[in-house]
Structures are given as structure tokens and as C-alpha cells.
Image: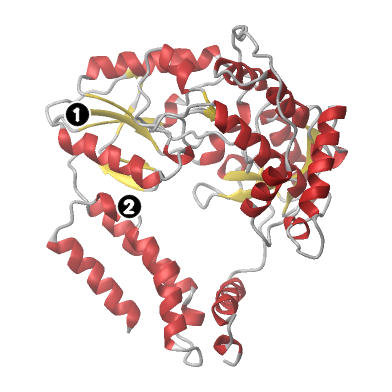
Amino acid sequence: QRKTETRDGERYLYRLAKARCRQAEDTEKFFGIKDENGHLLMDRKRAVKRWHDYFEEISNVEFAHPAIPFASPVYGPVQKITVSETEAALRKMKSGKATGPDDLPADLWKSKGWCPADWLTEFFNQLLAEKKVPESWQQSTTIPIWKKKGSPADCASSRPIRLLSHTMKIFERIVDRRIRDVVQLSTNQCGFVSGCGTVDAIHAGAVVRIAAWPKEVIGNAMPPCEGRRPGHLVLGASLASPLSEGGVSNDSPPIHAKAFDRVLREVIWYALRQHGVPEELIERVHILYSCPWSRVRAPAGTSMELLISVGMAAPWTLLYADDVMLACEDKTELEREAQAWCDRLALFGLKLNVKKTEYLTTDVNEHRSIKINGTELSRVTSFKYLGSTITSDGSLKLEVNPRVSTAWSKWRSLSGVLCDRTIPEHLKSKVYRTVVRPVAKYGAECWPVTKEIESRLSVMETKMLR
């Protein structure tokens, strides 16, 4: 109680909430994993080998594709990295994050006891002059995190997170800022445009559904790492431009099979050149991928090294987005655009996962779906898009009910703090307002709210506060 009354009481309370939440979890980790034939492996060595083989395949096998088109390089002088750029990159680095193989946290470079920005700037410029990066920058640790959907014993149900060098991430942020100064991003790329976010994309989807009736919509609910969400941004340069050449609209959600892991690096260089990024800047990105390799750290143990020849590390400063929703008034036009998009993706080594791409229409008189590559899409009455639920009838029942359930789940995980009588009420109120309430209100800006919805949320909040 004394600690919560100090100046850093709020910060301590959040740490206490996390600690108590972890104590309530089952600490026994399940390490079993299924092999290629679906048989459960309970031997630790075989389980580790399975993880190694799985990530080795998705990190090195390319989809069949024609030769990547040629894009004329842009030559010209590029200024050296400045101290102000390094300082700006350091300010964006978060503290307390897991470190990479070099075990150097960003907190070290953010310390005020010396001038790390000056040293880092000189170090980065030396790397660029030598066109070679430290070996630790090529190393990473891949940790599979269960997505909490599907079987935890299935490799595909886990999201691979790679622990990378924090020093390399600082360098990436500097390069990212340089590329953003050159590349013009369209406003529909909400995740990468200043002042925009997922709510903007959710609102656009709601407007499309409500404004025109009937509408044809195509969508999917694929998780991030498997391609969870297309719309391709690569290294700060958008592949939406080449995709648009194929006649595809950029407001929709199908998805790519393993898009995040399968994107070809030749496509990245091509996209950057198409956007007029100077060749020297592209070279700065290129040296980060000279010979990357990783080890898989799973509950069963740590695997041997595996090379990574395709795909991109996640998380990465130079990310691209992959959450898209196509929308058309005419069903035939939607089918044509979806097929054109699929064909265009294939030209660049990406593959649309037709099995997990869904079709939704607001036309009650339409009883058939559309086809892509001769395969009829699964027809649904609702699908998930950026955490929000889009329905064919515009009903908010499937949107509000999961929000309330998720909020209760979050409240229960924090009950060790929220129900502790020794903690001051104003601090518990702060935790509730900053952690629980935002979960219940996610995407609510786009709801055509009714009295029934207001009453439902009010009842939920009243019960929680009691």
C-alpha cells in the first residue's frame, strides 16, 4: 500500500497487476506438437526438430512465380546519418523489451550518463562505409506464440516472433524515416499514415456496408503472421501500386497464404525502385539481409540454426500491412477484381489463400458466392476485419457481445488488483479506465449506437464497478 501512494505508484500498480495475472496462469507449458502427418510428438527432441523443420520450410521455400520485372534504379547522393536522426530513433524505442542475441537493450542507448547518440551515429556511418553489419544483426531467436485460436499443437496456430538486436532496430528506424520521406503512402494505408489507425479502416468498412444497399463484400479473418491481413506495404514502400496495376481496389479483406513469411526480397527491391527510392538507401536495407539465420526457442527447447532466405522478420520496423477488404456494388465486378488481384499477387511470388478468403453480401436475394481460380469462396453472414465484425444485415449483436465478453475477460485477469481493498480507489479507477474500458469500446466510434447497446454497456460497467 505504501508503494502505491508514492509518485511512481501508478507505474508500480501496473507492474503488480501483470505479476498477479501471471501468478493466476497455468505455469505448466504444453510442449507437444503435431508432425506433418498430424501425429502428436511428445518427445522433446522430436518436437524441437519439428519446429525447426517447419520454420525452415516457410523461411526458405518460395511459391512458383515468373521473373520479377525490372525497375530502373535511382542513383544519387544520400547524406550520412546525423546525430539528430539517431536521437529521434532512440526516442521511439520502447524500454523494457526483450533483447536479441547481442543482449544489448535499447535502455542502454537511452541512458543519460553519456552521449550514446554520437557514438551510434559514428558507428552506423562506419557500417555504411564498409557495407557490412555485425554478425549479431544477422542472428535472431524465433519464438512461436500461440494465437489462442486453433490447436496449440499445430505449428500453423502459432505466430512467430523474432527477437532482434535493438541496435539494429535503431538503425532500421533511421532508414525507415529516410524511405518515408521519399515514398508517398495513400491514405487508405491507415496503419502507416500519421494520424490514422485501425478505426479509420473499420469506419470505411462500416460506411461501405451502410451507405449502399445491397453491396458485395469479400473478406477474411486470417491471423497476422500467416498472412494475417493484406494490403501490402513493404519496407515503407507500398506494393499497392503494382497491385493496382492489376485492376484491384485497395479497400478490402482476402489474404495471402503465409504472406508475411513468403514475401520475396527481390519484390521489396523492385517496389522500392518503383517508388523512386535511391539505390544507396536500398543498399542500406539490403545489407541487413546478407545472411540472416535464427534459432527456434519453443517450450520443448531450442533448435539448431536455420537460414532465412525469404520472408521478413516479425516484428520489424520496416513492416508491411496485410489486412484488406474488397468491396463492389456489382458481384461480377467483384469477382473480376478479386481474380485480377490473385493473378497479380502470383506474379510477385505471393499466393492468395482462397480457402480462408470469405464472401459476404448484403443482397438478400443473392444465394451464390463468387469464384477465384475456379474455387468457390465460402459464403458467410459475418467476418472479422481488424478486430471488428462486419455483418450482412448491419446488426451490431455480433459486434457488441464479443466486446462485452472480452472486457469481462480482461477485468477478471485484473481482479487481483481491482478487488484489492488495500489499493486506493483512484488508482483502481485509473487501471479500469486505461485497461478494461478501452477493450469494451474498441471500434465503438463506428457503431450506430442504439438505446439497447447503451444499456448493455452501462449494465456491464455497473457490475464491474460494484
Which mark is drawn over residue 443?
A: 2
Where is residue 342 drawn, in percent x and y?
Answer: 44, 17
Residue 464 visible, this orientation: yes
Q: Quadrant of the C terminus?
A: bottom left
Q: Is residue 393 left or right of residue 178?
A: left
Where is residue 33 drawn, in percent x and y?
Answer: 66, 46
Q: Residue at x 53, y 26 (%)?
A: 183
Name the image colouring. secondary structure
Q: Quadrant of the N terminus?
A: bottom right
Residue 320 lies, with reference to residue 108, above or below; the image says above
The mark closer to the camera, 2 or 1, is 2
Amino acid at pointer 2: Gly
Q: Residue at x 29, y 38 (%)?
A: 204
Residue contact at pointers 2 and 1, CB within 8 angstroms: no
User: Where, by quadrant of the figure, is residue 62 drawn?
Assistant: top right
Residue 218 lies, with reference to residue 19, above or below; the image says above
Where is residue 254 drawn, in percent x and y?
Answer: 40, 29
Q: Which of the pair 48/332 is nearer the observer?
A: 332
Where is residue 159 drawn, in percent x and y?
Answer: 59, 44
Secondary structure at numbered mark 2: loop
Q: Is residue 104 left or right of residue 311?
A: right
Q: Is residue 261 left or right of residue 53?
A: left
Give the spatial CA distance, label 2 vs label 1: 21 Å
Please name the residue that numbered disc 1 is placed on: 215
User: Where, by quadrant of the figure, is residue 24 drawn?
Assistant: bottom right
Q: Which of the pair 466/1 is nearer the observer?
A: 1
Which mark is drawn over residue 64?
A: none
